[in-house]
Amino acid sequence: MSDHDHHDHDHDHHPEAPSDIEARALALESLLVEKGILTSEEVDRIVSMYEHDIGPMLGARVVARAWIDSEYRHRLLQDGPAAVKELGIGYPEGTRLVVVENRPGAHNVIVCTLCSCYPWPVLGLPPTWYKSPPYRSRMVREPRSVLAEFDLRLPESVAVNVWDSSSDVRYMVLPERPAGTEGWSEEKLAAIVTRDCMIGVAVPRVPAEAATR
Amino acid sequence: MHDMGGMHGFGPVKIERDEPVFHERWEGVVRAMMVRTIGRYYNLDEFRHAVERMPSHEYLRASYYERWLYGVQRLLIEKGVISSSELAGGHAAGKTAAPARDREQAPALNSRFRAGDRVVTRNMHPHGHTRLPRYARGRHGVIRSTYGPFRLPDANAHGDHDEWQPCYAVEFTAHELWGDEASSTDLVCIDLWESYLEPEAKA
Amino acid sequence: MSVDRSIAYLEGDAALPRKNGELVFAAPWEGRAFGLAVLLSDKGAYAWDDFRDRLVQEIAQGDHPYYESWLDALQSLLMSRGVVSADEVSGRAAEYAALERDPVF
């Protein structure tokens, strides 16, 4: 123990015995690994994924609430950060969030041609394609071709509104609630709202098995 | 090289399904370094400008977090936080306490334009940083909403941190930006600072 | 991963500790405990709602730090399913506590 005294600020080293709770967590994991139920690498992957990629589920909750509560929807469109905080989701002070709503004749999609601005407090970190030169250069010029590459084909009767996030304002798309979801719980609705729906390169779809049930 | 809106020749969007947040651990480290140092040693506009100063051929070849690493490293050296010799040697010459984050409040300013006003963007080509994309210069649009005031990036990236301006979401038709071949219904909305805009001359 | 949505719906006292929307783990073991519970549900060892119910119960029972309740809920659920026994866990934990095993996460 005294050998390690000069290291006592460095928690990466484990000079001391683990606490009771820590020992119990270690015990559970090692037993499950020994039983062949999981591997430590799988646990690593889950932890790092959730530490950084918790975002899109938060945005999905916001969308689902807006779908079932029209007054909430109104507040969300008026003041994005305040409405997000209402759901107990943290939103950093001093940054703005503008939620743009898809309607039957208008579809919204987000891009940042100058860098890669992205509403990370509600969507997590952006996917690589969002930050790539093809997406950044083409979304403003030929949005319909780019959307088709994401398997989203819109009729000419639907106007595409592209939002180029060039300032301190961050944008998020509020998609339309799809038909066939009447009576669904908020949680079930949130499950069909993907990250891509909130960037605007996809629209929520009702899974085949849910539609026939 | 960063001003990519409308550029040709990049091909289709490469969509990676179920991609990991960080492809390699060092990417997470770079992100963490940027998040810990921004607002203390440099601001977002200075960071963007540093990344934009990456030589074009490197910018295009570099991955996203390689560009971030370039920006963070360049700024930390320029601001005297680390030295080139420390970087080369791999050891810090000493410890310094991190300064507090800048949390200055925006001043109250009158906005020159309001929603529905018709404006035309300036045709400007500054050497330094700007957030007026090239594809939207000299174009006619309509004010959709007013934000801010925000610090003017063109000044804030270059040491003048006291220049605040209202910022507007300005709507342009695809026709106005890209000509008659573009869809007649589509729109592009861009956030633009007040000094990028002039009122449209009355017909 | 469908369980993502369920995690977003841990609400009230059962809500995960976060900072700016991202999960925060005060110590490595908290992250491990979190990862174990999510992974086991993904693998079908139990339904997520069963874990959530136990977590809510554990939190309601005592004034323990969040991830202690989490680990208690996970352990009791695994014991009730016969995946691990109380003796196995306490025996193994004692080995770690006595430094008979290398305590590296």
Image (cartoon, coloured by chain):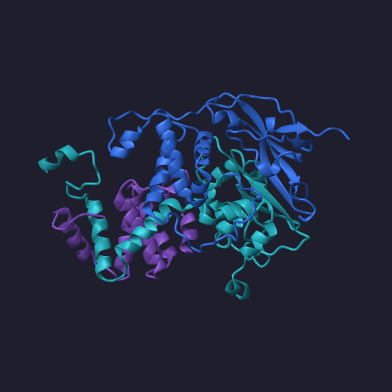
Q: Is residue A186 visible?
A: no
Where residue C66 appears, as percent x and y from the top left, is: 36, 49
Q: Is residue B69 visible?
A: yes
Where residue B190 appears, as percent x and y from the top left, is: 67, 42
Which quadrant of the structure image shows residue A144?
Answer: bottom right
Residue ranking furthest to the right: B203
Where residue A191 appears, as percent x and y from the top left, is: 55, 62
Left or right: residue C49 compared with residue A138:
left
Left or right: residue C78 compared with residue A160:
left
Q: What shade does chain A have?
A: cyan
Image height of C44 relative to A200, above or below: below
Quadrant in which the C terminus of chain B appears: top right
Residue ranking furthest to the left: A2
Residue drawn 56% across and 53% down?
A130
Where residue A89 appears, as percent x and y from the top left, is: 51, 46
Residue drawn 32% across and 67% down?
A38
Which chain is displayed in purple in the rendered image? C
Which chain is displayed in blue in the rendered image? B
Depth order, front residue of C99/B175: B175
Quadrant in which the N terminus of chain B appears: top right
Depth order, front residue of B129/C36: B129
The number of callouts visible is: 0
Which quadrant of the structure image shows residue B198?
Answer: top right
Left or right: residue A134 compared with residue B144:
left
Image height of B89 relative to A135, above or below: above
